[in-house]
Image (cartoon, rainbow, N blue to C red):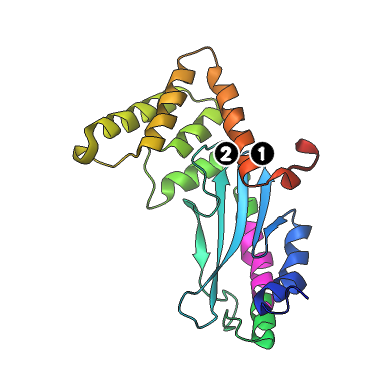
Amino acid sequence: MAGAKDPVRAAITTHLHPVLTAAGFFRRQAKEYVRVRGELVDVIGFQMSQRGNHSFYVHRYINLLSNPLMNIHAYRVGRRLDRDPLGSVAWEGASEVLAQRAVASVAAAAVSEMVPWFDGIDNLERFVVEYVAAPDSRLEEIELAIALLRLGHLYRPWWSCQALLDAAEQGEDAPFLVDEETADIARQLQRALDSDAGYISLLEQWRAQNISRYHLAPCLGDAS
């Protein structure tokens, strides 16, 4: 039994898998589930403690599929759940008994908190609001620019790209740091915006790259 050496993985299969697959999620990795809704990529993933105490956290968050800088393990829209929001069950898996109890608690939280949270952000407009409201976000972000483009707004994304390019040129004197990869993406996007709707094919290209990079095709169903 492949999962016998990992009580948390086995407990996920027993308790959480039926709940999340019923909600349309796909098991991308042993401890990570994803769901694609148009441009929104919903992720529920486990983070095991590095302290050796067998505890774990659960992250639930949303990424943007057409973002060429998307890292499916990082996010701006979402949060980390550190403990059982419904009671006092410790989220740790040192033994099979503890792991089964803990992940059953996660499954209950998925029903009461996680899936409803995702469903409450059911379009790009809501995603943009959540993105802007995040304490670590800026208006000059590629992900936000692409969300606005998908909503049909062209001018703010162009100027966001310009702000990123200006910051990259200023280097350490800029109000925020911009790496070369981000600057290159900003250049590509700004050039596409200067052409006749060329940005649409560019966004579709980046979308396809993320589907391939993160093996998201099973999430798309008939939409692929």
Give the residue drawn at x 72%, y 55%.
25
Circle nearer the viewer, 2 or 1 = 1
Position above or below: 116 against 39: below
Which residues make up the magenta segment? 104-116
Examine the residues drawn in magenta and state their main secondary structure.
helix
Q: Which residue is mark 2?
A: 124
* Residue 140 seen by the camera: no
* Residue 1 forms part of the magenta stretch: no
Which quadrant would the N terminus be assigned to in this image?
Answer: bottom right
What residue would you read off at disc 1? 38
Most extreme residue toward the top is 196
Q: Residue furthest left?
A: 173
Give the structural element (helix, strand or loop) at label 1. Answer: loop
Answer with left or right where residue 45 lies relative to residue 222: left
* Residue contact between numbered discs 2 and 1, judged by CB atoms under 8 Å: yes
Instruction: Check disc 1 and give the amino acid type.
Output: Gly
Packing grade of label 2 (10 A; few <14, some 14-19, many >=20) is some
Residue at screen point 48% across, 43% down: 129
The one nearer the camera, 17 or 216, is 216
